[in-house]
Amino acid sequence: MIPQLMDAIEAVKTRRSVRRYESKPVEESKLREIMECARQAPSACNIQPCFFFVVRSRAKIVELSKTHKYSGFLANAPVVIASCADDKASEWYVQDTCAAIENVLVSARALGLGTCWVGVHKEDEPYAQKALGTKLRVINLIGLGYPAENPSVRKKEPVFKFVD
């Protein structure tokens, strides 16, 4: 049973990138709930080109943490979610996958978990594909676990303008 969740607006506004995690495992019920939220993301023409690997194997997590110079913190995450896509299924595979990723980040926050996503650049993608045993495009890797830090709120500049 999933505990009481925080309000969606609060989850969006308080989500921060967490790079240090407690060693305690993440409950499978929470992982399933997060992946269900990813599945509910919008997808162009409902093609749904996204696929996620939920990695809990310590050896595989350490291997994925070596994808590139910014992914080292993943080695200490209890879970790494690799977000992937079939680039032949839809020309909108990146946008669709990123919408699903945001659902992962916000739903994890609502469940009391911390996350940090690391983009996988084209030159690093073959390494991640080999580690995961897939030919799907690897869009990013997400560290996930109970936060062992509480990153401060950074000032966010307005990114909108009302047009009448």
Image: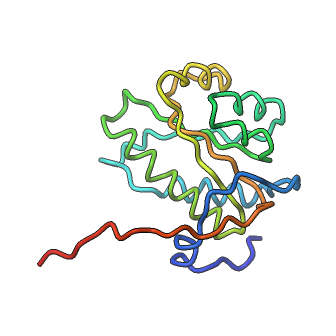
- The residue at the point 56 percent across, 78 percent down is 10
Q: Residue 39, position in %: x, y?
A: 52, 53
Q: Residue at x 83, y 30 (%)?
A: 59
In the image, residue 119 lies at what x, y percent? 53, 39
Q: Quadrant of residue 27?
A: bottom right
Image point (39%, 55%), residue name:
42
Identify the image quadrant of the C terminus.
Answer: bottom left
**Residue 68 image position (x, y, % from top left):** 62, 29
Which quadrant holds the N terminus?
bottom right
Task: Tell me the quarter of the picture where residue 72 sits.
Answer: top right
Residue plotted at (43% across, 38% down): 49
Q: Is residue 69 above or below residue 98?
A: above
32 is higher (above) or lower (below) than 7: above
Residue 29 is left or right of residue 130, and the answer is: right
User: Left or right: where does residue 34 sit relative to residue 113?
Assistant: left
Q: Give the left or right position of residue 129, taking residue 155 as reference.
A: right
Q: Nearer the viewer, residue 43 or 63?
A: 63
Q: Residue furthest left?
A: 164
Tag count in the figure? 0
Residue 109 in the image, given as x and y percentages of width and height: 64, 66
Q: Nearer the viewer, residue 21 or 51?
A: 21
